[in-house]
Image: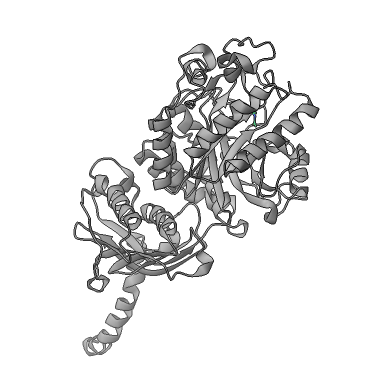
Amino acid sequence: MKRITLRFLPLLTAFFLSLMPALQAKQTGSDLSKSNLIPRPVTIESTGEFFEITHATRILLSETTPEMQHLATYLAGQLAPATGFTLTTDPSGNSSSGDCILLQTGKADQKLGREGYVMEITHGSLRISANGPEGIFRGIQTLRQLLPARIEKNEVSKGPWKIATGLITDFPEYEYRGAMLDVARHFFGVQDVKRVIDLIAAYKMNVLHLHLSDDQGWRIEIKSWPNLTTIGGTTQVGGAKGGFYTQEEYKDIVRYAADRYVTIVPEIDMPGHTNAALASVPELNPDNQAVKLYTGTNVGFSTLQTKKEITYQFLGDVIREISGMTPGPYFHVGGDESHSTKKEDYIPFIEKVQDIVIANGKTMIGWDETALTALKPGSIAQYWAKAENAKLGVSKGARLIMSPAAKAYLDMKYNAKTHLGLKWAGLIEVDAGYKWDPATLVPGIGRENILGVECPLWSETVVTIHDIEFLVFPRLPGYAEIGWTAPALRNWDEYKVRLGHQGERFKAMGINYYPSVKVPWK
Ligand code: TNX
């Protein structure tokens, strides 16, 4: 008996040793394919080991441009508060000795495009490669989600900081993946906007559309028309003190966004939604008499004078000043719900404004009503309400941003009891917000007509950053995934499990989220 056991010992040992990696993987969760990433990447392969970030891990760069150095600093800054590590960046460092995170640009697969990346994680190193810095930045967001949720805390937490090994290849479905914040109905300061930028960038969104003017407030300093903010910026819905961004503050927001590869799209809504401008500039009114400031929530009662020359002089100045501070390619002219503008006036008005936008080097975006006009090549329509308008836009060669109110409006209540939000477009539970495909939603509109997806947050009922977070989370990661992940890789039953795991990240980030019963929270 004894002799038999001894004879088989080497074989038995070999057998158990061969099981070790699998056992280890089970016990400690080192299966990269089970990492609950949002948005879901294109492919993930696991190799069953670990990479560990320690105080000695170095961040290496394949090229030492200021932009790449900046990204290395950003990465170290993301990891510092929770780990307590001050990771060093070693520009010319050699990766062969291991224990490094390598950020490598150039020579990546063309199919990754500008934003895609490949992440190769081995026991000794983690490498993110991409065609340029933008892809590296998106990859860093994946790296954050591969670490334990407590990496998002603002205080030092216990390690170890292990990441499962394997290979991720990832790139986006749509090039425009955005959120919108209405800072006109209620004003939100620079710090709040930066918080929103950080939160959307964590889910690989790349656009923040700012709704900068409406009946209730004008929120951006225009040097040639100072009354817009000294009068039009003073109040908000409900009558409390409003606010506005100075040009320096706006530039600061734009820079902060650019550092996170987020494009700011400024919107000045016109010819309707203009009461704040009409209250600030008497000459914009038919009788040259300024109207009163407005703090209610009705829509459709105001209009610019489409036949007055001063209107275009005014808009020329506004569009020039804002465009000059906006590096992104877009200028949004609103154009929605202009119920007090005659259709025969609306059409030539938008066409004139389109020319001004183009003359300032920008591409025009307008809400879907602008599809009624003669759109120039390149102009973009944002579908929110009328499929007929969206199809008309497509027939004129416009590309679409998909923001269907009934699916993608962040200001719609989750259910009848939600204390914030509106319900005119319906209730949008977390599953309903996720279960749609922009490319099949409207018959006659296909993938090729769509530039991307945007989820707008209108702020009639939203007063604080706390309120913003409650309506934005947990729906926003779903819109981010609709924009990033191909429809074949998306289904609610699988997504909800990944979303459930994000709950602990929301907590670590201090996000005031809606704990929907539809989601199996971890
Ligand atoms: C419609 S969406 C509007 C906004 C409101 C929003 C409230 C759009 C282009 N216009 O003026 O704030 O509904 O959900």
Front residue of this view, candidates 220 and 358: 358
Location of residue 155 (image quadrant): top left
Front residue of this view, candidates 488 and 262: 262
Q: Within the displayed image, which quadrant is ligand 1 positioned in?
A: top right
Q: Is 373 situated left or right of 491 in this image? A: right
Residue 515 against residue 341 in the figure, above or below: below
Q: Is 230 situated left or right of 123 in this image? A: right
Which residue corresponds to the image point at 53% horizontal and 14% vertical from the top-left? 238
- Spot occupied by residue 503 in the image (x, y as percentages of width and height): 42, 42
Residue 59 against residue 300 in the figure, above or below: below
Is residue 415 shown to the viewer in this render?
no
Split into 4 quadrants, where in the image is the N terminus? Answer: bottom left
Residue 351 against residue 277 in the figure, above or below: below
Front residue of this view, candidates 65 and 497: 65
Q: How many marks?
A: 0
- Spot occupied by residue 109 in the image (x, y as percentages of width and height): 48, 70
Location of residue 507 (image quadrant): top left
Location of residue 456 (image quadrant): top right
- Spot occupied by residue 124 in the image (x, y as percentages of width and height): 27, 69
Which residue corresponds to the image point at 66% horizontal and 15% vertical from the top-left? 285
Split into 4 quadrants, where in the image is the C terminus? Answer: top left
Is residue 154 shown to the viewer in this render?
yes
Colour setup of the view: one colour
- Spot occupied by residue 311 in the image (x, y as percentages of width and height): 65, 24
Which residue is situated farthest in the right direction here?
Answer: 344
Q: Is 383 situated left or right of 522 in this image? A: right
Front residue of this view, candidates 498 and 199: 199
